[in-house]
Image: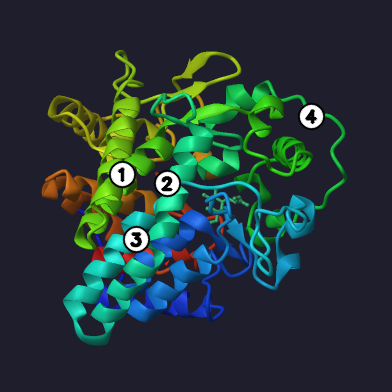
Amino acid sequence: MTCTRQASDEQIRQAAVKVLRLNDLGTMTTAAPNLYPHMWSWDAAFVTIGLSRVSVPRAIQELRTLLSAQWSTGMIPHIVFSDNATGYFPGPERWGTDSVAARPAGVRTSGICQPPVHAIALRHVVDRGRENGGSDQSAAEAFLEESFEQWMAWHRWLVDARDPDGTGLIEIHHGWESGFDNSPRWDAAYGRVRPGRVEPFTRRDTLHVADAAQRPDDAEYTKYLWLVQQMESVGYDDKLVPGLVDFRVRDVFFSAILAASSDGLAGLAEEIGHSTEAAELRRIASRFQNGVAATVDPVTGLARDYDVRAGEWISTRTVSGFAPLISGGEKALLEAQRDLLRGPEWMGYRGLAFALPPSTSPGSPAFKPRTYWRGPVWPFLNLLLGWASRRNGQEELCGELREASLCQLSDLAFGEYYEPFTGEPLGSLAQSWTAAAALEWLA
Ligand code: 9WN
């Protein structure tokens, strides 16, 4: 499918750089200007990838800021709050993390995590530094040496705290940890969450989007806050949370990202002579790659999450079903997944504005074209799929995703997500990781 661009490459590049500049607070880039006035963990990784095309030192700073918020357990929190802590709810007070001893002093954070895309971003920073040479190269290589143990601690924490039984899948305790907040993947699990008394709250997110119906509703938010309250009641203790929290699922997409990132970090470890850690990371990569492959539904061909409390597979048709393309795996599995992705339920669905996978298949009864993770297309995910396709030796698929993405992003709105059939940008505009994805696609 060919598509038309509304702006030249140079116009897209300049507009994307402007978004990142306007969202830059100096040492952190906010995820979006109004809706998200703080740093989000997996957004920061994509922002770093985009920034590395503009300034390697600034890209390094982004990861450094994120690492300054790492808990002593190794966890990297999903939000690092800026000083503008009143601009988003729930803020640090509601998270109740100020009294958690594992949190580094002087940095306010949430108490949960997000998918570990960071080592992929670090690989980009090192590669850009080496391409540029000179001070960019020395800064990137010095940063790799200096930060390596912290990335290692992050991956080890995920493995030890979130997969203690060696299933090859990471357990999450909140939809926010998946980054796919209200995806229909989580509907059944949330259906079983029965909130107790939740402290009263006033949302701020709905003030910053054109139509509040695009966001999760209040009943969903009540459950989100209930889970926070449950975890907060035990100080986010890794040993205690699984025993009391009402949401426990093994997230296949998160696990695939851990596999891919661990493999990437292993390569970086080898380059700096950490061969023991490299071997450990390769074992992690293969454990989670196998874990992901084992979830594939023989009927749909999509990878599945697992609801731990219900003891059930989750078979909703969402884009997370393509987790094996991210983790990598056996040739036959990846070929089948690529066919599916290009097929009539996904990139080839009739009438799509751009041949890009919607977050939920339009063929699914759960599909809602304008509602957040229930249907819209999320541009940063397409960059991740493109990156993985190239790593898997699939330049052609990467090229298709690139072409369609650049057409989509040539509206210069840098939407958080897009209506799949009209191509309308939705949610927050000038979203940082969307701008970053554009910069990386243009390179
Ligand atoms: C909650 C920042 C984040 C993304 C998530 C996305 C959304 C937050 C929210 O925004 O989540 O973490 O308030 O809706 O779902 O993937 O990291 O862009």
User: In the image shown, does 114 or 234 lie closer to the viewer?
Assistant: 234
Q: CA distance from mark 1 to mark 3?
A: 16 Å
Pointer 1 and pointer 4: residues touching (CB < 8 Å)?
no
Q: CA distance from mark 1 to mark 4?
A: 39 Å
**Residue assigned mark 3:** 121
- Neighbours of disc 3 within 10 Å: few (<14), some (14-19), many (20+): many
At a point 56% along the width and 55% down the height, the residue shown is: 427
**Kind of residue sitting beneath label 4:** Pro
Q: Are marks 2 and 3 in contact (CB under 8 Å)?
A: no
Comparing marks 3 and 4, which lies closer to the viewer? 3
For marks 3 and 4, give the CA distance: 37 Å
* Beta carbon at label 1 within 8 Å of ligand 1: no
Q: Residue at x 33, y 65 (%)?
A: 438
Marks 1/2: CA–CA distance: 8 Å
Q: What amino acid does circle 3 point to? A: Ala
Residue 293, horizontal then vertical, whole percent: 29, 25
Disc with the residue nearer the chain's start (2 vs 4): 2
* Pointer 4 residue: 195
Q: Are the two marked residues, 3 and 4, in contact with CB atoms closer than 8 angstroms?
A: no
Residue 140: x and y in percent read 30, 74
Q: Secondary structure at mark 1?
A: helix
